Image: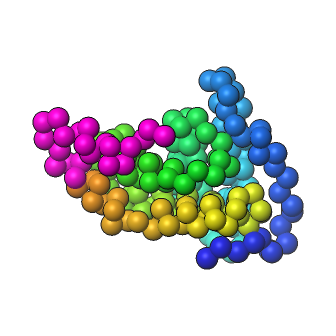
Amino acid sequence: MAELCEEGFDVLKVDKRDFTPTTLEDEVRVDKLCSDLLHRFYMELQETGMSPEEATALAGAADYFIRDFVVSIKGRSIFEERPGIVRQFAGNWYIVNTMEPLATEIEGYLAGTREFYRFLYGHQLITLKFLQAIESECSQLDYYAGRIESFWDIVGDGYRAWEQECTLKD
């Protein structure tokens, strides 16, 4: 459930404009900013009483989504409030770019992603509407499991139809 951050953490000062990659070289700078923010997320998870192992799992999962997909593949700011990004990740990119895609693995990535966006909302860095869209996309585990199954069932030139159902194109 979405809640604003009231745990008494230090105020998180972020200039969201700094998180927009404009060139390939700039992507390195944005990647570092995201890494720092993910570390803050990791630390706050532990400050709420979560074990280091659980915090590592969630932060690592969020890291894969944020840095490898949103910034590197999509070339977007993590603050760009455009629904559908989680669906593109879990319903297409992860499946195509993983040797043995597993629904249980997607579930872990989505748990970390959901918690990271709750963290952003808690620090008033994204809107409630966008958080709710992210949470909704993260909850569609049966859909993503079906996408994995249908991927393995592709024959002939069926990939195009499979890709169009959940396209990476914006």
Residue farthest to the left, as pictured: 156
Q: Quadrant of the N terminus?
A: bottom right
**In the image, what residue occupies the spot 35% across and 59% down?**
144
Question: Does the segment drawn in magenta span residue 62?
Answer: no
Instruction: Report the number of discs.
Output: 0
Query: Which residue: 54% across, 66% down?
Result: 135
The location of residue 16, given as percent across then percent down, is 77, 46
Horizontal relation, residue 138 to residue 117: left or right:
left
Q: Position of residue 93 (x, y in %)?
A: 40, 43
Say if 157 sits above or below 115 in the image.
above
Q: How is the model colour-coded? A: rainbow
In the image, 116: left or right of 90? right
Q: What residue is shown at x 50% (from left), y 67% (from top)?
A: 136
Magenta segment: 150-170
Asked whether 154 or 84 is in front, the reply is: 84
Q: Nearer the viewer, residue 165 or 105?
A: 165
Q: Is residue 53 visible?
A: no
Report whether residue 22 is seen. yes
Quadrant in the picture for residue 159: top left
**In this picture, residue 67 sits left or right of residue 105:** right
Q: Position of residue 131 (x, y in %)?
A: 62, 64
Residue found at x 73% / y 67%: 122
Q: Is 154 part of what is drawn in magenta?
A: yes
Residue 95, compared with residue 5, is above or below; it is: above
Q: Nearer the viewer, residue 45 or 16?
A: 16
